[in-house]
Image (cartoon, coloured by chain):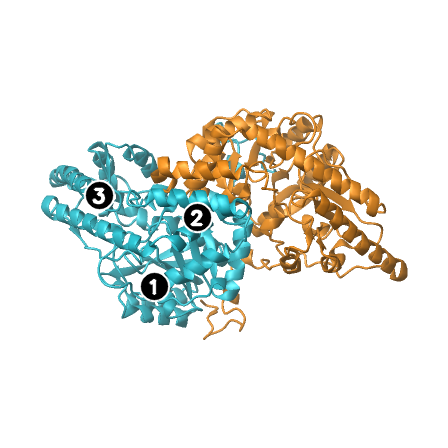
Chain colours: A cyan, B orange
């Protein structure tokens, strides 16, 4: 106001309110990648970019009837405001779902959120002051990095290897940050079939990571959307199963059922849970009763365990299609073979830049997410994330064939000119998580 | 971390993470009123407290069939992630709804949110730095005050009279704040059937308020959940209908259709809209497609205008029941007679304190919201908000009879002892908007 920004007094022609934004909004710009993905969503493009689950396997007739019965029998509840913490009937079901990973929780410990993205937002909101440090795997989920940045946190990456987060590296990073006098608030980790790297934290390392965080007074945020989507054996015990006071467990029905209801949750120690409920009420009043009761009714009346099993088979077949096609068509790249989840993390041949290659890939009708999206600091241009969740195996193979043409053409350029890269990305951007990249 | 807070290193017995919260979370405590409302929700209590719409008038069979058909015919869209901005089909319908109040908007201008509460949260997030001033009517919506406080804003109240916000008072407050060098970011106003005061900003004052805000470079946030629920005549022109650059228009389907889907929206100038979408994606990825398509289908296939007309009749009858009962049973109080919406704002007889009276009222099986909830600064103890939206006319009359007994007993105490008041409320509390107070 002392700095008037209205069109008739100041501001810019493009944004009359330019001078009025909060500091936290300054970095909010749509990244150039987003514009590209608008093109990538066209049907002729094979998208290996998105994290959208494949929903055609769902029993739509059953869900349709469930919704109808729900409104007929519990309509005035389903259509009304609900509790800020979420409906108790759903919270009870949630405790049964997480029990599959060894989590013992009471319905009182659960807060239902608008997707687990909202849980991330609420946790960051109540814990992170500007300048606080959040630790995250290198690389990590683009949508989490966006949340941390929007609260003006400083993300410090911790290296992973084939067995997940490396405890000795975690310890070293923490020791250094202590020396520097930094306030480290959270360790954000995706222990199972990590997004984007596809790796899983080994059972041996789980208590080690927790012990280190406990020693340094760092709260662990365990983000676990893919834990039940492993291709072999039983789910591993969640970090929360070892420690109910030092871990916030974030879960979601987006990958195991359907994202369209936007139902996720967080399991938290009592006092933290209270603050999360207050923060959520301030943010949305209450999560959708219609959505919550739809999910609860699905869990109650349908064999959801069999559905998850069917998803596992489906995604395993697609993973096999993807890594098989990579071996056949792009043998010069390297990648991991994930045991579950949605993603393969591919290292490009020497000298190739995933970010500058993307426009050419989209022109060749295939899309992926460049590795830079998954780092806070501009790293990752030599990697790309390929997802195998949405396209059919045949489309996946076609996509990799197209990608191979692009990679080969880039490699020729590199051989001729030594590089194919664009200038570094503007790391001030909040690389906002386009919803279809979740 | 330099200040370790884990149970084994520090913290309190009740909350091991006590020392780890962000500054913005420090005031987040459940107010004492909330505990009381847990009791007030029992069926034997007549609640004149909640802002829940009366849903039994809805055509549940039609909605049930709509939901079934939606999943059968568009299931893989309804159950999938959607766009961060919201589904275009719904945004088109929204432009038709707001046209009833003279708002000319393009679907591109609309951002769909998880209830209009999320719109409030996003607007505050992108505009308000700690210490910035937000202007709000005195009194104002408890849930908005909670959002402003959670972003560490300083709310300055502007007086209203029977014709709404008083332009000369607005000008005087702004002039004073300029002199003090304060940054005023937003004017938050509910122009129609205001929550809690029930008054409506007159047509004459609408351009005056906008002109003052424009001159001082203050963005107007027009929160309009009740605009179509007027009991007489046509809806007044929205503030947004006068000015598409200086006003953010917040709307909701919670009062005119059903809150259980959590579908609200904000209409914003282009550049602001872009930031709102990015902030929303960071917060929830995308609003529920299932909810959005349910609302869009309802608007498309059902005579929603007739439903709103039915609501108007229903709520008018209840308002008449409430003000009639007040005149009969508590003539020593004073109140306004609202022309629409859900609320009557009652001034208690001299010396009575609405906040300290509440436990006795709940014991007498009637509940209301004390006026203090609607001020940032502890004012309002002489007022209470009575809502007429949810109970039947008969229950409303019974509630007022019970309330009269309590008021009369209090008045006797006052006559004997000069006061019935408790100590002042702790104004550091975020009086979080319990969902049923919306």
Residue A288 appears in the picture as rendered: no
Q: Work out whether mark 3 precedes mark 1 in sequence or the reverse, and give the earlier one.
A: 1
Label of residue A100 in the image: 1
Circle 1 packing at 10 Å, graded few (<14), some (14-19), many (20+), is some
User: Which residue is label 3 attached to?
Assistant: A353
On the picture, is B240 further left or further right than B106? right
In the rendered view, would you say B377 is above or below B178?
A: below
State the residue at coordinates (20%, 48%).
A318
Extreme residue in the bottom direction: B8
- Of all chains, the one bearing label 1 is A
The answer to which of B397 and B349 lies nearer the viewer is B397
Q: Nearer the viewer, mark 1 or mark 2?
A: 2
Q: Which mark is residue A294?
A: 2
Question: As drawn, is B137 to the left or to the right of A242?
Answer: right
Q: Mark 3 vs mark 1: same chain? A: yes
Please give the chain letter of the residue carrying mark 3: A
Distance between the alpha carbons at the discs numbered 3 and 2 = 44 Å
Q: What element carries label 1?
A: loop
Q: Is mark 2 on a helix, strand or loop?
A: helix
């Amino acid at each position: 106001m002392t700095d008037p920004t209205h069109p008739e007094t100041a501001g810019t022609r493009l944004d009359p309110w330019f001078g009025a934004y909060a500091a936290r909004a300054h970095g909010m710009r749509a990244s150039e990648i987003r514009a590209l993905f608008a093109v990538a969503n066209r049907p002729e493009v094979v998208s290996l970019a998105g994290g959208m689950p494949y929903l055609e396997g769902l029993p739509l007739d059953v869900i349709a009837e469930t919704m109808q019965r729900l409104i007929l029998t519990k309509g005035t509840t389903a259509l009304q405001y609900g509790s800020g913490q979420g409906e108790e009937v759903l919270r009870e079901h949630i405790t049964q779902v997480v029990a599959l990973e060894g989590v013992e929780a009471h319905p009182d410990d659960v807060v239902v959120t608008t997707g687990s993205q909202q849980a991330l937002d609420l946790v960051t909101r109540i814990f992170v002051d500007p300048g606080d440090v959040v630790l995250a795997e290198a690389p990590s989920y683009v949508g989490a990095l966006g949340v941390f940045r929007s609260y003006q946190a400083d993300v410090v990456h911790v290296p992973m290897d084939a067995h997940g987060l490396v405890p000795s590296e975690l310890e070293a990073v923490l020791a250094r940050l202590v020396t520097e006098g930094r306030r480290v608030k959270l360790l954000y980790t995706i222990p199972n079939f990590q997004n984007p790297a596809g790796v899983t934290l080994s059972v041996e390392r789980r208590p080690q990571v927790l012990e280190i965080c406990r020693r340094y007074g760092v709260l662990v945020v365990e983000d676990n959307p893919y834990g039940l989507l492993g291709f072999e054996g039983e789910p591993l015990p969640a970090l929360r199963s070892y420690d109910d006071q030092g871990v916030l467990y974030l879960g979601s029905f987006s990958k195991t059922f359907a994202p369209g209801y936007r139902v996720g949750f967080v399991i938290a120690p009592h006092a933290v849970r209270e603050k999360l409920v207050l923060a959520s009420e301030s943010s949305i009043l209450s999560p959708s009763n219609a959505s919550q009761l739809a999910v609860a009714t699905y869990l109650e009346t349908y064999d959801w365990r069999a559905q998850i099993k069917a998803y596992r088979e489906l995604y395993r077949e697609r993973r096999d299609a993807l890594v098989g096609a990579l071996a056949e068509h792009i043998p010069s790249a390297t990648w991991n073979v994930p045991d579950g989840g949605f993603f393969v993390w591919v290292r490009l041949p020497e000298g190739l830049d995933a970010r500058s290659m993307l426009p050419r890939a989209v022109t060749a009708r295939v899309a992926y997410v460049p590795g830079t999206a998954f780092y806070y600091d501009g790293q990752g241009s030599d990697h790309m994330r390929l997802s195998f969740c949405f396209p059919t195996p045949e489309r996946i193979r076609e996509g990799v064939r197209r990608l191979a043409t692009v990679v080969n053409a880039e490699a020729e350029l590199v051989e001729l000119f030594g590089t194919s890269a664009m200038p570094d990305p503007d790391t001030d951007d909040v690389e906002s998580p386009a919803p279809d990249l979740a």
